Image (spheres, rainbow, N blue to C red):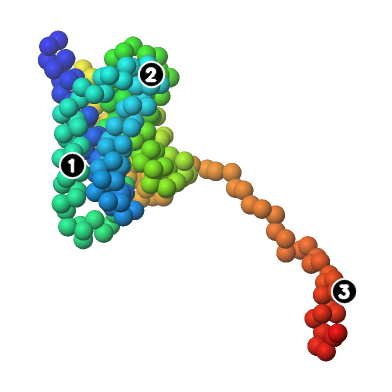
Amino acid sequence: MKGAVRGHMVAWDLFSFVGVMAYAASGAVVAIEEQYDMFGVCVLGFVTSFGGGILRNVVVGIPLKSFWSQTSMFLAAFGTLVAILLLPTRWLLHGKRWIVVFDAIGLSAFAIQGALYAKQMHYPLIAVVMAAVLTGIGGGLIRDVLAGRKPFVLREEIYAVWAMLAGLVIGLGWVDGRHPVRLYVLFAAIFALRLLSVWRNWHIPRKPFRTPRLAGRPQPAASAEGEIHGRPGSV
């Protein structure tokens, strides 16, 4: 029993640290692409790291005071931001590629962490799935809004669906904290599915919206006054 609890805590801490560091790097790369100064890089990195957890706590009803007790997470995010700022600029030239990778890591880690949190609190399935989605996509959503970009989750890309899948698997009890190896397999599966959906250009269908063409409509005739003033030698 003690071994299962210890394994659960190790998995919980691991997913928390991986998610925080991945999303901090994601937010920092986006800020650098948008030519933010160092303060802006740090702000966007921290918001991306912790925004999803704050949204989850608000919706699920967890007191926000627990947010301020995670000193080690703040240090992990800060260390990641310093590392990104110290990297040579040429390493960040392929910013979009790095953002997709960091996003996939953060999405998978935080979706599982959020679902485990709700499951541990004995919330129903819908709340477990909601916690997985909010924790998994919340930070990236806030990051994109602050950076003036269309959020991943609102595009036709398959993004939040993978967080929902993680929440569903944990909410149904197919994977839980007593079997950390299964959690790691789930993490790898969600990460791989996100990257695969980007590589294969998978999209959620959307309803096309086009304005009606005006080519067939007759053009309005020129006014008599315009014709008179448009002739050479007219008075």
Q: Would you identify the image quadrant in which residue 142 lies? A: top left
Q: Determine which residue is flagged by label 1.
A: 80
Q: Is residue 40 left or right of residue 160?
A: left
Q: Amino acid at mark 2?
A: Val
Distance, label 2 to label 3, CA atoms, is 69 Å
Q: Which residue is mark 2?
A: 60
Which of label 2 and label 3 is nearer to you? 3
The amino acid at mark 1 is: Thr
Marker disc for residue 224? 3
Disc 1 and disc 2 in contact, CB within 8 angstroms:
no
In the image, residue 19 above or below residue 81: above
The residue at the point 21 percent across, 61 percent down is 90
Quadrant where the C terminus sits is bottom right
Q: Quadrant of residue 173?
A: top left
**Left or right: where does residue 79 sit relative to residue 229?**
left
Helix, strand or loop status at disc 2: helix
229 vs 188, left or right, is right
Residue at image point 66% right, 53% down: 211
Q: Position of residue 17 (x, y in %)?
A: 19, 32
- Report whether residue 141 is seen: yes
Q: Where is residue 61, by image quadrant?
A: top left
Q: Residue furthest right?
A: 224
Label 3, secondary structure: give it: helix
Q: CA distance from mark 1 to mark 3?
A: 71 Å
Q: x%, y% of residue 26?
A: 28, 44
Q: Residues within 10 Å of mark 3 (few under 14, many from 20)?
A: few
Three-letter amino acid code at the position of disc 3: Ala
Q: How many marks?
A: 3
Regarding mark 1 in the picture, which secondary structure is present there?
Answer: helix
